[in-house]
Amino acid sequence: QVQLVESGGGLVQPGGSLRLSCVVSGTLFRINAWGWYRQAPGKQRELVATVTNGGITSYADFVQGRFSISRDNAKNTVYLQMNNLKPEDTAVYYCNVPRTIGWLYDSWGQGTQVTVSS
């Protein structure tokens, strides 16, 4: 059974940076694309960034140029480097395997809370 364990969140001032990690177990990490999602209170979960098994990355417009996704297949880990954080980035962040519609695993990790506030 897949396990997704996110970490690295916290409270940061606007303009600050955080690096999130998601450690994956119970699945063949290296064959899948991986993505970071976020969900703010009262809003739907949205896709933030993806990285393919070949290392090709893509980003939602609202984080383009500020966030960077990467992966380490040897550690079964996907990362999200977040720079120049804004209050609207406040959300719980999760990782999962992106699909054309939705995501692969219905069993999400606990997520990691990111709060951007002065």
Image (cartoon, helix red, strand yellow):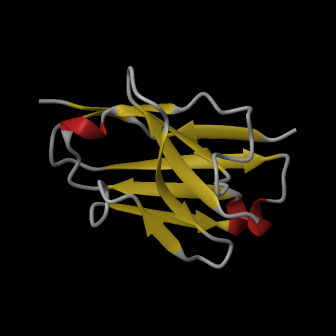
Answer with left or right where residue 87 lies relative to residue 10: left
* Rendered-image quadrant of the C terminus: top left
Q: Percent position (x, y) of residue 107?
A: 74, 32
Residue located 50% across and 44% down the image: 37
Q: Is the residue 89 above or below the residue 98 in the image?
A: above
Query: Who is closer to the viewer here, 118 or 88?
Result: 88
Q: Residue at x 50, y 71 (%)?
A: 57
Image height check: is 109 above or below 68? Answer: above
x, y percentage for residue 104? 74, 47
Whether residue 114 is visible: no
In this image, 93 relative to 62: left or right?
right
Residue 85 higher or lower than 56, as above or below: above
User: Residue at (15%, 48%) from the top-left corner?
Assistant: 15
Q: How many marks are shown on the rendered structure? A: 0
Whole-percent x, y for residue 47 in the image: 49, 49
Would you say residue 25 is visible in this rendering? yes
Expressed as whole percent of the image width and height from the top left, the position of residue 25 reads: 79, 47
Residue found at the very far front of the displayed protein = 101
